Image (spheres, rainbow, N blue to C red):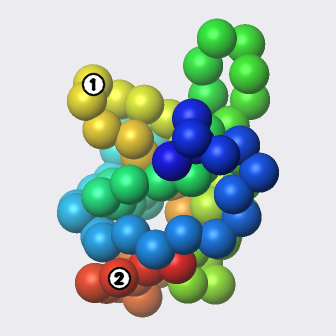
Amino acid sequence: LYYQDVMLHEFNATLVSKGMDEAGRHYVVLSNTAFYPTGGGQPHDTGTLNNVDVIDVEKVDDEIRHYIQGDPSTLDGVVR
């Protein structure tokens, strides 16, 4: 979605997975996203998913990880 409409501020997605990286940061992976990940010198987008702050977005292998500040258990099913 971030390539289709750079001004998109709201979207719906399904939670695909949750995890924690080696540094202990919680992240979620979504079915699609409007958050641009860090890359090519451009910084990542920030915002919220269901009122949980997204503080970093990175592409790791084939997934886009949305690093969140807070409890990942509050995100389930469809997120917005």
Q: Position of residue 25 (x, y in %)?
A: 46, 52
Where disc 1 sits, the SS reads loop
Look at label 1 and name its amino acid. Asp
**Relative to 35, 27 lies left or right:** left
Residue 4 higher or lower than 74, as above or below? above
Which residue lies under the disc numbered 2?
78
Residue 73 higher or lower than 19, as above or below? below
Look at label 2 and name its amino acid. Val
Q: For residue 56, say whether it is visible.
A: no
Mark 2 or 1: in front is 2
Residue at 38% from the left image edge and 69% from the top image edge = 13
Residue at 35% from the left image edge and 29% from the top image edge = 60
Q: Quadrant of residue 42?
A: top right
**Relative to 17, 47 lies left or right:** right
Q: Position of residue 37 (x, y in %)?
A: 57, 35
Which residue lies under the disc numbered 1?
61
